[in-house]
């Protein structure tokens, strides 16, 4: 039976990919860095900080991805408070390729942020970040609350005094039993509070963000709210105004299927509903 199911799943994935990409199109600014900058500059005119990041797709080579990262650096150079988010698994953890990105970032004085990926890739991501800590480029790093290892990684980032983005996390902890997403998020916040250089509280969960900001501020830690472009923001922006917190918006561009990992559909049926809802929305807006 499994032998029959695997080809069926591959066929379904190929058929679904165009639908997923269309449905998720509202989660990226567009296909190019110019599209991202058009959105980012509007946000900046409203007093928002931003980060841009290229979301690569199937068929993108590591060299092609690095070209996009370098284009992103050039686009945001000279804009205060901005930085580039990168995904080093997409460049196959190549120090040689990343060196090209770091060299450009050093020349342009742009911060490079290491996004999180899967738990299995976390060690290699950290190792590559460590390789360039003394490169003369400001670096920052994402910690997912759902991973047990993030507490130890928090101490490493405190020791290195790198800014940290805390997220709930898209990928599960495959090495240990997972904690509750909110509890895990706040555990990482507690590990950073009073010790970290700066923390971006990256979530649209208003209740969680309120508590995380309270804990960080009580400990005297520099912090702000970070949101993902394309997700609902009204309540989050109202909270930011109430807390008098700066807001940073993550503006991705490129391929748009990342919010809907097909492998998650089986475990989280709500994703199928979100996908169909957004597909309908994108279809109607195109019409």
Image (spheres, rainbow, N blue to C red):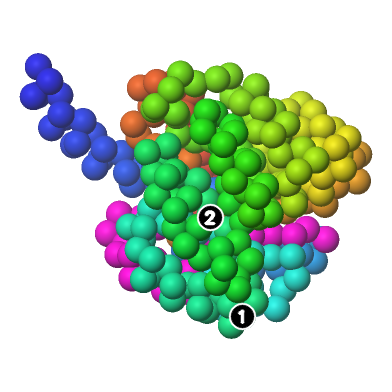
Please check the rendered image and state whether residue 56 is part of the magenta-colored stretch, yes or no. yes
Left or right: 40 with respect to 132?
Answer: right
Mark 1 neighbour density, 10 Å: few (under 14) some (14–19) many (20 or more): some
Q: Residue furthest bottom?
A: 107
**Quarter where residue 118 is shown:** top left
First in sequence: mark 1 vs mark 2: 1
> Which residue is disc 2 drawn over?
114
Q: Is disc 1 placed on a helix, strand or loop?
A: helix
**Image point 51% across, 72% down: which residue?**
102
Q: Residue furthest front?
A: 159
> Which residue is disc 1 drawn over?
108
**Quarter where residue 153 is shown:** top right
Residue 63's place in the image compared with 178, above or below, is: below
Q: Quadrant of the N terminus?
A: top left
- Residues 41 and 67: in front is 67
Please check the rendered image and state whether residue 31 is part of the magenta-colored stretch, yes or no. no
């Amino acid at each position: 039976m499994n032998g029959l199911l695997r080809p069926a799943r591959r066929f379904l994935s190929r058929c679904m990919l165009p639908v997923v990409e269309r449905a998720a199109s509202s989660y990226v600014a567009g296909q190019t860095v110019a599209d991202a900058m058009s959105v980012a500059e509007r946000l900046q005119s409203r007093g928002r900080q931003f980060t841009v990041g290229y979301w690569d797709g199937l068929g993108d080579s590591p060299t092609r991805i690095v070209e996009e990262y370098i284009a992103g650096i050039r686009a945001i150079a000279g804009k205060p408070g901005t930085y580039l988010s990168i995904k080093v698994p997409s460049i196959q953890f190549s120090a040689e390729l990343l060196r090209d990105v770091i060299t450009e970032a050093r020349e342009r004085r742009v911060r490079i942020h290491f996004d999180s990926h899967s738990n299995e890739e976390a060690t290699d991501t950290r190792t590559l970040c460590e390789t360039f800590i003394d490169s003369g480029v400001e670096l920052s790093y994402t910690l997912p609350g759902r991973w047990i290892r993030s507490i130890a990684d928090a101490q490493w980032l405190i020791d290195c005094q790198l800014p940290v983005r805390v997220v709930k996390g898209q990928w599960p902890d495959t090495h240990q039993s997972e904690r509750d997403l909110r509890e895990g998020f706040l555990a990482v916040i507690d590990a950073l509070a009073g010790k970290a250089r700066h923390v971006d509280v990256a979530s649209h969960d208003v209740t969680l963000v309120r508590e995380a900001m309270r804990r960080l501020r009580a400990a005297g830690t520099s912090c702000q709210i970070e949101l993902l472009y394309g997700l609902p923001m009204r309540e989050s922006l109202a909270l930011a105004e109430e807390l008098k917190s700066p807001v940073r918006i993550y503006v991705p561009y490129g391929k748009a299927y990342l919010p809907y990992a097909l492998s998650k559909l089986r475990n989280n049926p709500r994703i199928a509903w979100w996908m169909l809802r957004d597909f309908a929305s994108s279809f109607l807006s195109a019409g």
